[in-house]
Amino acid sequence: MKRCKATTVAALLLLSMSSLLVAQGRFPPKYELSQGDAASLLMMSGRFVVPLQVKTDIMKGVPRDFAGEGTYFQARLGEKDVLFALDGSKPPKLYVDTNRDGRLSDEKAFGVGSPKKGDQFEAIEGARVYGPVSVAAGEKGAETRLSIVALGASAIYVSQAGFMSGRVRLDGQDYRVVVADCNFDGHYDRTYGVPESAASVDVECETFAIGSDAEGKFDQRAAVGGPQPLPKMISVGKTCYSIQVAPDGSSIEMDKVEPKMGTLDIGKSGVELTLWSESGVHRLSGDAGTWDLPVGKYAVQNLVLRSEDKTGKWSLMGSPGRDKGVGFEIVGNKTTAVKFGQPLAVKTEMTVEGDTATFSLSVAGQGGEQYMAMPFRDNVPAKVTPKLVIYNELGKEIASGLFEHG
Ligand SMILES: [Ca+2]
Ligand SMILES: [Ca+2]
């Protein structure tokens, strides 16, 4: 009798625990192959790889059924390189070093499929799609699944073949949540951190998106903030949720949180900012000049500088400088002031090749951000061509020219 009671209590406990978990938004996602509906989600994992020019030892041992000379590729996926080869068959067969032992002689051929409907390569003639191909990743036993597109013999495009996808109900509304292993380590839990060196362009983390659950499919146009590096938390409407993904992707948990907040002050600079952070993507626009943001580091991804005069609404597209990125940190209950935009520093640079001098024009803002020297008026490229005039020491014009875009 006593024993029976204990079982009932345990069962009740388990029941109340599981209902607690559901209320907190924990759910088990499933792996889905991309059907072309998540192109921009997987784009962060995508890379174009050009053929190797020099034959190395790893290419000596080719598989027995390998036809012809072949074209070889090497792509850095996660911690290690992966070797690929297209043979001389028509259409070519693809070989991949799936166990990453540096040899292709132990590998089987993958045949060609065709681009799926809605795929970004559907319109490219001659694009051949291979995969999904499972490749050893990171620790022993972990795998990551690749999609490979051959673009003639000139390049291959390697990306994730799919993603983990599940549904969650937040504040009475259904959302679809997707996470892709975009750092190719076979795990799904690496979150984004603002890189120490903002010049590094590779995003060594997963990609995440949450959007409306229309038709049970992921609608990236309706994604909150768009596909983005996996954040630790994200704002959906006015509520903030933490995100926890199990390393193997078997569960995702989203809980309501109230992060510490601070203030960003960029003054009346007329600058719109797109920021990446541990609290997701933030797009700041409008005349406010100040915004409340969760504490943490932020990296500026792009900027738009806007101004208006009697000729129209002007805008300049900007990015966080070539050498040093633009970033800042938001501290709890404090205001972080960052300067962007005007006054702009216009710099010309000269490169000489033979008897031809080429001048280039760069436009930098107060924060070191770089703008394209091509203004838009009312969202249309304005036909304003900067002119360069060279004077001699007597002030007489000796040469002049117009800047060409591109
Ligand atoms: Ca191998
Ligand atoms: Ca990963």
Image (spheres, rainbow, N blue to C red):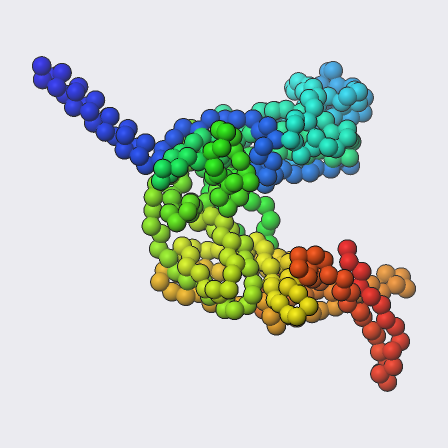
Quadrant (top left, top right, bottom left, bottom right) of the N terminus: top left
Q: From the viewer's perspective, tell me whether residue 39 is left or right of residue 196.
A: right
Residue 273 image point, x, y percent? 54, 58
Q: Give above or below for 163 relative to 303.
A: above
Could one spot residue 256 in this view of the protein?
yes
| Residue most extreme to the left | 1
| Residue most extreme to the bottom | 394
Q: Residue at x 78, y 26 (%)?
A: 70
Which of the two residues, 68 or 279, is positioned nearer the viewer here?
279
Residue 76 image point, x, y percent? 62, 37
The image quadrant of residue 3 is top left
Quadrant (top left, top right, bottom left, bottom right) of the C terminus: bottom right
Q: Residue at x 73, y 32 (%)?
A: 123
How many marks on residues?
A: 0
Q: Residue at x 50, y 29 (%)?
A: 215
Residue 141 image point, x, y percent? 49, 25
Residue 246 image point, x, y percent? 41, 33
Q: Give above or below for 176 relative to 388.
A: above
Which of the two residues, 140 or 56, is positioned nearer the viewer here?
140
Could one spot residue 194 in this view of the protein?
no
Q: Give above or below for 402 relative to 127.
A: below
Q: Give above or below for 275 relative to 102.
A: below
Q: Residue at x 74, y 68 (%)?
A: 348
Which of the two residues, 270 or 86, is positioned nearer the viewer here?
270
Q: From the viewer's perspective, tell me whether residue 18 is left or right of residue 49.
A: left
Which of the two residues, 375 or 173, is positioned nearer the viewer here?
173
